[in-house]
Amino acid sequence: MSIIDHFTHVHYPPTKWPRFEFEEDKCTHCKSCYLACPTSCIQWDEKKKIPYATGLVEMEIACLGCNNCEAVCPVGCIRLRGEYRVLKGRYKTLEERSGDMYPPCPFGKKDLSRSFEETEKELTETERIILRRRSIRLFRDTPVPKELIHRIIEAARYAPSAGNNIPWKFVVVTDKELNKRLERESSKILYMIKWLYAGRGLMRKIVISLVSYLRVNDMDQRPIAALQKVKQLNGSIIWNAPVVIYILADHRAIGDPNLDTGLAAENLILAAHSLGLGTCLIGLIPNALKYLPHLRKKLGIIYPYKCITSVCVGYPRGKLDNPVWRGKVPVDWIE
Ligand SMILES: Cc1cc2nc3c(=O)[nH]c(=O)nc-3n(C[C@H](O)[C@H](O)[C@H](O)COP(=O)(O)O)c2cc1C
């Protein structure tokens, strides 16, 4: 990639979007696909009571290709096919990653000719949970018993960490008022970022490219589409989940405490799904917390801790953990 390519096309890069496929005659008009879509990609046509796909300014469809719309549809009338592929610039999708999405194939090509239900008979319980788990964005109001929260944090405590530093701290928030305040104040910060990105004009293009250069990996169209969804849901970031667990890392840990935190988060998430709970990682609030010192203090995020991520937890509204198609990940074998 040339140096010019590296710093251009950060603002609305030319993109090949997944294809939205919808069978109207099957649709039960339950709205789940619209409610569970993490971005503004799926909209709801109030007149016809059906979903349609769209984008932000200059986006064809604001789709991450996560396929949660398909996972939550009770009758299988919705699909996203093709791939999310950035064609130019800093975030250009590598050739070796290009290609259509495909379903879980733990046993290779033979899985393409049979249903996942057939394949999963040969899987372990752990594999089944990993391949079925989805980010849950439709929650019931039911509170989660404290014992279950304790259990999933215990799974996190047993994640591997460099030098067995165990560099984590967990902050569990079930206080509805505090969760609302965190959403309210975070969304104000996040909307400013969205305002800067979402629009036309050379000036914005230059500013975004500059910010992207100064804060590598911070300026991409996908979180912007997620912020558009937050706006449409009146500032809701945690999807009405009853519990949010903030995962903090001790700055002073050896190695890479961020990596350790990711491992702990995944343990927590998988344990939660094995117990019938749903989870969704929430990066938007921890990102905004960088600019909200009074809320950091309220959550006890003080030196030596920093907040790396958060996970919202609750009982899913329906059976939402389902396998979906995913993009290609290159694997090199050196034998
Ligand atoms: C670091 C990180 C931050 C994330 N932040 C958010 C978030 O703020 N809001 C959200 O709805 N989903 C968030 N997600 C969930 C991703 O959108 C989701 O994992 C991805 O689309 C794949 O879908 P799946 O988890 O259902 O397989 C985050 C995921 C990760 C790993």
Image (cartoon, helix red, strand yellow):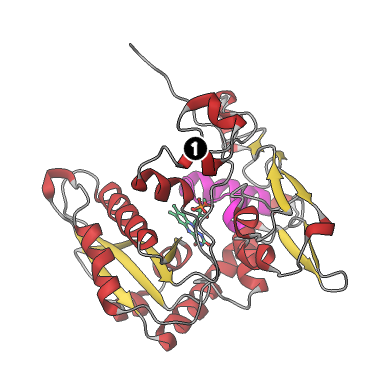
- In the rendered structure, does residue 32 fall within the stretch colored magenta? no
Q: Is residue 137 above or below residue 78?
A: below
Q: Position of residue 176 (x, y in %)?
A: 43, 86
Secondary element at image label 1: helix
Depth order, front residue of 223/149: 149
Give the residue furthest to the top.
Answer: 335
Q: Is residue 72 left or right of residue 56?
A: left
Q: Position of residue 291 (x, y in %)?
A: 42, 69
Which residue is depicted at the point 57% across and 56% down?
223
Which residue is depicted at the point 40% across and 82% down?
143
Residue type at mark 1: give it.
Answer: Thr
Q: Quarter-wise, where is residue 153 in the image?
A: bottom left
Name the residue tied to disc 1. Answer: 119
Which part of the image, by quadrant, shows the N terminus? top right
Q: Main secondary structure of the magenta part?
A: helix
Depth order, front residue of 249/147: 147
Residue 301 in view (yes/no) = no
Q: Position of residue 123 (x, y in %)?
A: 40, 40
Depth order, front residue of 31/45: 31
The magenta region covers: 204-224
Q: Is residue 197 left or right of residue 181?
A: right
Q: How crowded is the residue under tag 1: few (<14 C-alpha within 10 Å), some, or many (20+)?
A: some
Which part of the image, by quadrant, shows the C terminus? top left
The image shows a total of numbered marks equal to 1
Q: Is residue 310 left or right of residue 239?
A: left
Give the residue furthest to the right.
Answer: 47
Which residue is depicted at the point 62% across and 43% down?
10
Residue 113 in view (yes/no) = yes
Q: Is residue 2 left or right of residue 217?
A: right
Which residue is depicted at the point 44% across and 24% down?
331
Q: Position of residue 178 (x, y in %)?
A: 40, 84
- In the rendered structure, does residue 212 fall within the stretch colored magenta? yes
